[in-house]
Image: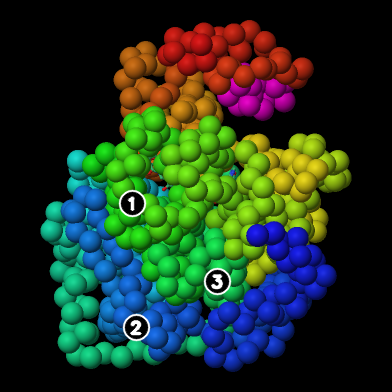
Amino acid sequence: MASRYHEIYQSWQRDPEAFWAGAAQGIDWIKPFDKVLDTEAGVYGQWYAGGLCNTCWNAVDRHVEGGRADQAALIHDSAYTGVIQKFTYAEMKREIVALASVLKNQGVGKGDRVVIYMPMVPEAVFAMLACARLGAIHSVVFGGFASNELATRIDDAKPKLVISAACGLEPGRVLAYKPLLDGAIALSRHKPDHCLILQREQLRCDMKEGYDIDFADAVARERAAGANVDCVPVLATDPLYVLYTSGTTGQPKGVIHDNGGHMVALKWSMENEYGVKPGEVFWSASDIGWAVGHSYIVYGPLLHGCTTVMFEGKPVGTPDASAFWRVISQHGVVALFTAPTTFRAIKGQDPRGELVARFDLSTFRTLFLAGERADPETIKWAEQSLKVPVIDNWWQTETGSPITHNPVGLGLLPVKYGSPGVPMPGYDIRVLDDAGHEVPRGTLGNVVLKLPLPPGCLPSLWNADERFRQAYLAEFPGYYKTADAGIVDEDGYLFIMARTDDIINVAGHRLSTGAMEEVLATHPDVAECAVIGIADELKGQVPLGFVVLYAGVSRDTALIEKEVVGLVREKIGPVSAFKTVITIKRLPKTRSGKILRGTMQKIADKEQWSMPATIDDPAILEEIGKALAARGIGV
Ligand code: COA
Ligand code: AMP
């Protein structure tokens, strides 16, 4: 089938407001919006101003009323416990209503924040939707973050309540969550009124009398009492959630997504970009703590009336590299969305893809990859093993859905290896040089998006309009800065080459090296430090630290390095994958004192590099090369 992409993209270009008014027909409005785009409101305008809606209604209730009551809404598959739980739309609604009633009894209402710090359990999805039902704003924090990171988010979001669990499961290990939560609340200045704690049989936790509330007991009581909580009408422009993501400092950015635009964008993407029909089974193998999890485990598939799969497990080791094929065949998955690192992990253990043949994957149509650069080798391996199109798409926590894609639902365009596709409606992508001038096609530059951003993108940062302006809008007036560098080719395909800031992408997880440097600098023996991201075969990138010790420090450097590694794990969490730090005598700098992180990264990755003209002392780079070589890096 010839792709309708160009026709659809041009229809958006001709009349963006008419396009988004049409797309808004895909959801139920309690009161229609007054304006498609209110250009006077918010930082750069607001979508669907004056409209009233409820995201939980659109994701759950309307399917119950509309004939999907008995269709599975959520399949939870735990590779650790071997238990598969299925919830129909009607069953899921009952769980959400009971939980919403618990939250309401605790005084949670419209506009209140609720932090959700949970492993991959169905109750985490119910918690997000119960907040949406009440018009409360959820903020999910990924379980791999430690107390300090959680505390920072609690202080910024100021939640009335935290919903958490006793433990999470990782291969061969049970991870206690509750001590991390208690530690965070001890650290935070803001104290939530209560914590709602899901006990798990793998590890029960101590409950603080009068403060912690047992999740299952409280929900069971409301269920037995036949509690009813209606969906609360909220403005389309009211926040649905705040998701913290790495910024260039230790203070994460609270990315807001609103209710109306977010629903419209996700519903549109499910049909047109992912090519999935209501009633089909969609699986996003991410974590609810990330943007991909929010958009494509929870909101996208449910808004579209699909069955969503939530997998508690890893692509390898639970039990082996066939785990994903088992899930696809057992649940009749039509499309899988994951990060390329997943496939590098599987390929590493089953290089010839032999395990695939053991499963019936006849329902499976498309593999979607995002979150980090998809290397052509991995894409080709996946294509050959699975015999389905493998589609790379590029987006950010801030956009909530793809900026570029190959829109399967509109008819596939030719796949170009290494490119995450072409701009989706709503996105006018430009590539600018550092002075803000557009560069010719095929030239590397700063990838920016012409304002206004389309529905579904962040309208601002939580309580930080000025930071939003400074971080994203100030450098290139009239444009949103993605902080990615890339190239648009003659056919309009984008190629993302690198970040222009200090963000690195570790196993599809977005992390800030600046935030790690802040932690390194707190070690009493560390005078100066730098953290860079270096290439890693499995995770794409991993962080590598350098420390310069204070003069006169005579302690064993190996011990100090171990302490520094432990400090990052303690302050940021295991997700940082910070395992290596190297003690050096001095850091390479420019004459104006800027650390030459880029050059150090090139040396570590064995890339071509040239001596920066402004370097203070060229001999230092030689010292760095030797220090790296001593650890087997860059040789
Ligand atoms: N709670 C607590 N700890 C967690 C966690 C969670 N939810 N998720 C990960 N961790 C821990 C891991 O146990 C690991 O700890 P360790 O250093 O003690 O071993 C550490 O954080 C790093 O985890 P991860 O980066 O996931 O590495 P891994 O070696 O456990 O697994 C992959 C590697 C490739 C299998 C894994 O990263 C993966 O499946 N990635 C999928 C990509 C993805 O979900 N991307 C999200 C955006 S699409
Ligand atoms: P996150 O906000 O965690 O989704 O991370 C967003 C960043 O991940 C982007 O700015 C890119 O640097 C990177 N990224 C996401 N998807 C892709 C992709 N398909 N190709 C290359 N980089 C990507």
* Residue carrying label 1: 360
Residue 557 position in % (x across, y down):
37, 16
Q: CA distance from mark 3 to mark 2?
A: 19 Å
User: Mark 1: few, some, or many residues within 10 Å (few <14, many ≥20)?
Assistant: some
Residue kind at label 2, given as amino acid type: Ala
Q: Secondary structure at mark 1?
A: loop
Tell me which label, 1 or 2, sits earlier in the chain. 2
Q: Nearer the viewer, residue 487 or 270?
A: 270
Residue 536 appears in view: yes
User: Do callouts 1 and 3 mark residues in contact (Cβ within 8 Å)?
Assistant: no
Mark 1 residue's CB less than 8 Å from ligand 1: no
Q: Report if residue 309 lies within the magenta region.
A: no
Residue located 35% across and 72% down the image: 73
220 above or below 30? above
Q: CA distance from mark 1 to mark 2?
A: 28 Å
* Residue carrying label 2: 69
Mark 3 residue's CB less than 8 Å from ligand 2: no
Residue 62 position in % (x across, y down):
44, 85
User: Do callouts 3 and 2 mark residues in contact (Cβ within 8 Å)?
Assistant: no
Q: Nearer the viewer, residue 312 or 227?
A: 312
* Residue carrying label 3: 267
Residue kind at label 1, given as amino acid type: Asp
Left-right relation of 526 to 73:
right
Residue 93 appears in view: no
Q: Which mark is residue 12?
A: none
Q: Secondary structure at mark 2?
A: loop
Q: Report if residue 589 lies within the magenta region.
A: yes
Residue interval drawn in magenta: 587-602
205 above or below 129? above
Q: Nearer the viewer, residue 115 or 351?
A: 351
Nearer the observer, disc 1 or disc 3? 1
